[in-house]
Each structure stands twice: as C-alpha cells, then as structure tokens.
Image (spheres, rainbow, N blue to C red):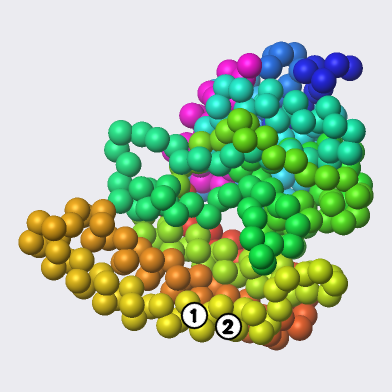
Amino acid sequence: MSLNRLTVSIVVPVYNGAGTIATCLESLLHQNYPTEAYEIIVVENNSTDNTTQVVQKYPVRLFHSHEYGPAPARNLGLAKSEAEVVAFTDADCVADPNWLRELIKLYEVPDTGGVGGAILAYQHANRNIVEMFSDEYSPLINFAKGERVFLPDLYAANASYRRQLLKEIGGFNPRLVTADDVDAAWRLQLQTGRKLRYAPQAIIYHHHRATRKGLARQYRQYGFGEIVLDTMYGHCPTYPRNLRFQMRRMLDQLAALPRYALSAGLRQIRLATGRATRYEAAVPQLWFLIESNNLWGKLEALIATRFMIDAQPVLNMKAEVLVSRLFPKGKG
C-alpha cells in the first residue's frame, strides 16, 4: 500500500469530555487524508457527564472502558484497530486539517516506529489568564531536548505508532495512571530498536487548563509521574535522573516559592498603580501554584516508591484512587 494510503485508526480516550469532544471529532472528521483510509475510535472511560450522548451524534466507533485511567482506554482502542498505524489524541484537542497527512509522511523511513507532532494552544476569543499562562509556559512538548532527557518521548495528545509494534510491547501500561504515554514511547524504542520521529507540521491544538484548580492538579500529576518513571527506569545505564538529582531539584523548587510569593505581592502593587496588567500580576501567583503542586505530587510519589527504590507499590494501587486524586472532573 502506498505511503499516503496507510490505514490509520485514530483513538480518542475521553473522560467527562462533553464540553470539548464535539470540536475534537469535527476536526478529525475533516482531515486531508483519504476518508476510506482512516477511522475514528472513541473510548469513553467512566464519564459521569453526557459524553456518550455527544459522541453518538458522530460517525465514529464508540466503545466503553470500565477500567479507570487513560491507558486501559487507549489499549481498548488499540485492540479494536486493524489499521497499520494507530494515532492518538485527546478529547480536549483539535487537529489541524493536515495533522494525519503530516504524521504519516515520516513512516516512509523503514525504521520509524512512531511519529508525533507539535502540541500548541487552542486559540479562542475568551481565553483567560490561566490559559494564557499555560500557553506561554506549556509543558506539553514532544521530543523535548535537554541534559536530563532520557529518550525521545511522545505525549498521547499527539502521537502515533505502527500498530503491530505497539501490540508487541503490550500497548500502554494499564497500571500507570499518569505518564503511561511517555513509558510506552520509551519501551517501544528500548524493546524494538525502532526510532521515534517528530513532524513539526503535524499540529494538534490543545485546550489548556482554564482554572487554577485544574492547573494545580495537572502539575501535581506531572510531579507524581516523573518520580514514578525515574523509579521504573533508574536501572538503565544511561538514565539521567536519580534520587540525588530529584532531591536537589525539589530543594530548588522549594527555595523558589518565597520568591514567587514576594513577586506576587509586588506585582499586585504595580497592578494597583497601573504599571502591570492583570496577566503580568498573575504570573508569579501561577508559578507558585504549579511549583508547589508539582512538589506535592513528587513527595507523594517519593513516599509511595520508598524514595525511588520500588515502583510496585504505586503500580499496585487501585487506578480509581489515583484517577480521583490526579485527574480533575471535566475540563478544568
């Protein structure tokens, strides 16, 4: 089959996504890719809103996952697919019309195991301060580079894999409630020897968190997941982060909190005197919020993993407990 006719299943897990899933599906149904060559699989994951009723209005395949967490939902979508490539995005995302076409182009290289693209902020007229902050300081960067980066990783908001390879490694780890997408990307490279590639024009627009509560829980989730991954992969010879690094990093984060608090107070004075905008005044408050919650998540994971000695206690925790703790209900 020619490259531009590779068959693709787009898998969209959704939990309480009634407010965003329609826009997501509209964008996926209008891809510049042969309609007969791709399908959309939506996996509803124990939602308590009217997500199912919204999805049923669209020509997609709808399944229900009764296991908590995004990993089991993604695995169910993978199991229902018979396509050559499985692409993933989330219910709070909007795909560029050329997203699928740009992803598939890089599968021309034989050793490509997976491809991801750019994750940008969804722009709309009523963006609030929290959304603007999340846009400017977005953590959702595929193929992030840096001294402490282990292997290329792909966030499941914008990721795709050869279906057979993803099945060979067992799909996403269902015992990981957070960071399951990064774990899958790393395992695919380590276990198959295939490479991940980055397609900058394969763009997904993400609805960033719109409330302080949602932003706080997001960074708590990131902190928790980072420590769990460090514990799981710390045995790898080239793994760049260990307990010593994390303790130093956490102390730096802790030391920064008083500075953020002081800066927040000073900016409130500047706001009152007309020398700062509402957004400028809010930035140090939001940095305090995300760093303190990131620390909270890391501390929880450090305790659960016995300070990065054993990940099994976390992997054995009930998924519904972690979901309720780390994931906001609905779009926050």
Residue extending furthest left?
273
Residue 248 got which mark? 2
Q: Hey, what amino acid is under mark 2?
A: Arg
Residue 286 got which mark? none
Say if the magenta span includes residue 173. Answer: no
> Closer to the camera, 148 or 67?
148
Left or right, 248 with reference to 215: right
> Closer to the camera, 38 or 245?
245
Residue beneath disc 1: 252
What element does badge 1 sit on? helix
Residue 174 appears in the figure: no
User: Is mark 1 in CB contact (under 8 Å) with mark 2?
Assistant: yes
Residue drawn where x is 75% and y is 57% of the image: 151
Left or right, 12 with reference to 136: right
- The percent coordinates of residue 324 (x first, y second) are 54, 63
Question: How many labels sit on residues?
Answer: 2
Residue drawn where x is 89% and y is 38% of the image: 111
Left or right, 93 with reference to 110: left
Residue drawn where x is 53% and y is 55% of the image: 139
Say if the magenta span includes residue 22. Answer: yes
Question: Neighbour class for label 1 at 10 Å: few (<14), some, many (≥20)?
Answer: few
Residue extending furthest front?
147
Q: Hey, what amino acid is under mark 1?
A: Asp
What element does badge 2 sit on? helix
11 up-or-down from 318: above or below: above
